[in-house]
Amino acid sequence: MKKLLCIFLMLLLLATLGGCGGNTAVGNSSGVETGETGDQEGNEEEVLHVNEFGWEVPKETITITYYAGYDDPAEAEKYAEPMAKFYKEKFNVEFKKIVYNVDMVERLNLMLASNDYPEVITWMPDDMAERFIMQGKAIELTPYLEKYGHNITRRLGKYLNLLKTDDGKLYKLPVGWGQNPNVAGWDFAVRYDLWKKAGLPIYKTPEEYYETLKKLMQMYPTNANGEKVYALSDNSQGANLYGAMLGAYGFKNGFKVDEKTGEFTHWINTDEGLEIARYINRFIREGMMDPDFLNNKFEDWQAKVMNERVIGNIGTWWHVWVAGHEAWGQQEGENYNIEKRFMNVTVKAPGVEEHTLLGSNFIGTSRVIMTDKCTQPENVMKWWNWECSELGTMITAFGPPGPENVWDIVDGKWMFKDSTFDNARKNEVFHAVVEKWGGKAYWMVTSGGLLEHPNIDPRVTRVSTYDFWPIKEDGSFLDPGVNICWQYTDGKSWDSTLFTVTFKPDDPITTVKQTIDDTLPSEWAKIIMSKTDAELEANFMAAREKLNSLGLHDLEKFYADSYKANVEKFNQLCN
Amino acid sequence: MPGIRINIRPEGEATTKSSKLNKLFKRLYREKELWFIAAFAIVWIAIFAYYPMYGIIYGFFNYVPGKKLSECEFVGLKYFIEFFKLPDVWLIIRNTLVISTLNLTIGFIAPIILALLFNELNNITFKRIVQTISYLPHFVSWVVVASIIFSMLGNEGVVNDMLIRFGFIDKPIGFLGEGKYFWGLLTAANIWKGVGWSSIIYVSAIARIDQELYQAGAVDGLGRLGMAWHITLPGIRPTILLLFILGIGGILNAGFEQQLLLGSPTTREYHEVIDTYVYRYGIQMGRYSFATAVGFMKSFIGLALVIVTNKMSKKLTDMSII
């Protein structure tokens, strides 16, 4: 009997041990399956437990030192405090985040020259990442990614291929990647209240937009202080004007792309370019453009918008958003009329199939690398992997969940606080996330784009690391003002990922690009400031000739070749 | 020993050299206090001005940040030649020389005139107040100066507003948007910012002029202008020459912040200078070799100009700085 009992107990023990060695997928109270399927050997000795956020809390504190680019060091440290405390307490992880208030490229070059750089560098431009890689100062990520980076591979998917070298090695990852969560991009805006009052029809083409602004200018020649009102102004030295126009003409990153031949033609070498120049020139010659538009700094321009001296905008949506209703809302408080705002409208040139006003580059242009100084690549990759989990992204973006913060985890759901749905306090909430809760303070690798997960509060949409938009049950925005702004914006974005181009510092084409970038604004200014049609055409042709002589055709070819190479890489490595 | 040449130094020569050394040591010993005081400055200059000069060598290599110099390719004068092959090189050189020349002429004379005017003020308290006020712009950053200029000279600025109100013009003049105004605008801004500060040295030079010369001038019937012309200006001539010769050395330094802050795409053909260009194409793009080569070239030309001007000055006025 004793023997039988002994055998039974032995079998029971074996069965129990066998059960322990089965599926180790980790579940937790936050409702996230983080699916830690990595190497578990010896983990029991190193790991205390898996916390409620899906992180395997190490016995010994992990400290990661990284450089994150441009910021005010004192301010960055101050804002990061709540996150630092949270990560230390709940994750047993510490960060030494380095930022400088100097240009990142300059600093990275100095770091390279002095051989003094930390184990991780993030938010670096792609070409700088290439420079580190070329010199053997970045470590290959594939082995660590395969072992610990399943969230990264899951969420980045086939786009990871674009970051690989020709021999399939991976040294860099994107940061702030993902699908563009915005509804609007380049913009043809109008003061909604004035437009509505005038009873004008909605415009769909550049010409109709011009007519609309012209009529409004006639109706409202001066503001309340008797100052002259302009149809348009600018604070980008004229670049936003052609940027948005090219979107209306379906140009891709400034190029006319022939999908059949794979040919890229820069806009200055196209008839559409001349049309665009004529269009903008008309505003200037007819006195509809703020005469200081080439010299305005953002603040000058903002002051004009706030003082109701500008009724339209050809540029990006957020410009008039910030300088318009956000500023008026704060300034006028309870007296603010919700209709006093700019409406962003999708405009398309006649004959153009698809506009390209809203682009979405999934991998973006910022990169993160582990340098050859990194002595704990496993730990760093584990962290990156956690940061790239959806919950990791939420925490990175909005700070520690809790009843005091703007969001909390309730019954496994990631719920935003009711008070954050108050439209009037939206801006306050937006800043509190960063300044009070350390949101985005330690953002090393995760997405900045659209975040989708069943646990996300269903009362919001277009959640990203930067923002979230409360909606009603019918799917419209909760804020009626936002519905006004975007009622005529179609929100269609085009995928610009394969158009990503890397300019390597030592490549002569980089100097060509810089020369073109420097010359184009002055030539553009000369063109649109022309006094007659003939002068405009002559200036346009002269600019075309000049830019081509500076190597614009080489640049066109480089863009075309890069696109072709991206497509091939994308397809080959996917198969 | 056939085939071997032994140089035997004449005894007299050795003696001369040893006596020269002795003299030098004696002089050093005699002036030991002065050398002790100067030692700190000499060490400072050696460390911060001469030691970094080894970096000039980077201008001759294709230096890639992060690599050892020995691993980088020697390219000789490649970057010096490349500079002269740049598409806008002559435009940049023209702008640099024009802006520098304007600073070296009008900008150089202005503080002398201001110092002469200060000298004519009899009320000491008023003189000090005016002098102090004139120094203030020197301490104002270019960012602030630029915003003052924008608000004054913009299309809706004070100047245009006044010109329109007084009926001189019908529509605003694009002072900031038209290239043809840029050089004048920049020179005026440079003078406004630096005239008071630069006048200090002339004011102190004027103060050292023997007062008896003025008394003698008065006896000879010189008026205020005559005294300024015949006594004050010759009295500060060495200072003027010294500063002019040194100023010549900086002829390729036409400014940097001013251009970046006041320039716009419409004025690029007038505001782009060597330093702004090198900053973008050298420093910002991490092309340190190119930046070093152009910097070295600028310094070399500056030094050569200083030496030539000094020689000319010695020949023409019998005064020199070396």
Image: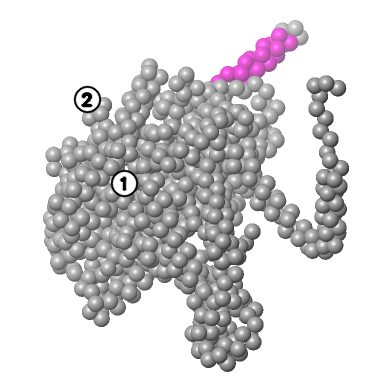
Q: Are marks 1 and 2 on the same chain?
A: yes
Which residue appears at 36% of the width and 72% of the height?
B152
The residue indicated by pointer 2 is A260
What whole-number distance in Å separates the C-alpha atoms at marks 1 and 2? 28 Å
Tell me, yes or no, whether the highlighted magenta stretch contains residue A18. yes
Amino acid type of the residue tagged 1 in the rendering: Leu
- Between residue A208 and residue A22, name the one nearer to us: A208
| Numbered label attached to residue A520 | 1
Q: Secondary structure at mark 2?
A: loop
> How many circles with numbers are drawn on the protein?
2
Tell me, yes or no, whether the highlighted magenta stretch contains residue A456. no
Closer mark to the observer between disc 1 and disc 2 = 1
Amino acid type of the residue tagged 2 in the rendering: Lys
Where residue A284 appears, x then y in whole percent? 21, 59
What subunit carries mark 1?
A
What subunit carries mark 2?
A
User: Dot 1: within a 10 Å radius of its alpha carbon, few (fewer than 14), some, or many (20 or more) residues?
Assistant: some
Q: Is residue B232 above or below residue A417?
A: below
Where residue B300 appears, x then y in whole percent? 55, 48
Which residue appears at 50% of the width and 45% of the height?
B294
Dividing the image into 4 quarters, which one contains the N terminus of chain A?
Answer: top right
Where residue A128 appears, x then y in whole percent? 50, 36
Where residue A490 appears, x then y in whole percent? 23, 44
User: Dot 2: within a 10 Å radius of its alpha carbon, few (fewer than 14), some, or many (20 or more) residues?
Assistant: few
- Between residue B118 and residue A552, name the one nearer to us: B118
Residue A571 in sight from this viewpoint: yes
Q: Which residues are magenta?
A: A6-23
* Left or right of B117 in this view: A204: left
Tell me which secondary structure the magenta stretch mostly adopts.
Answer: helix
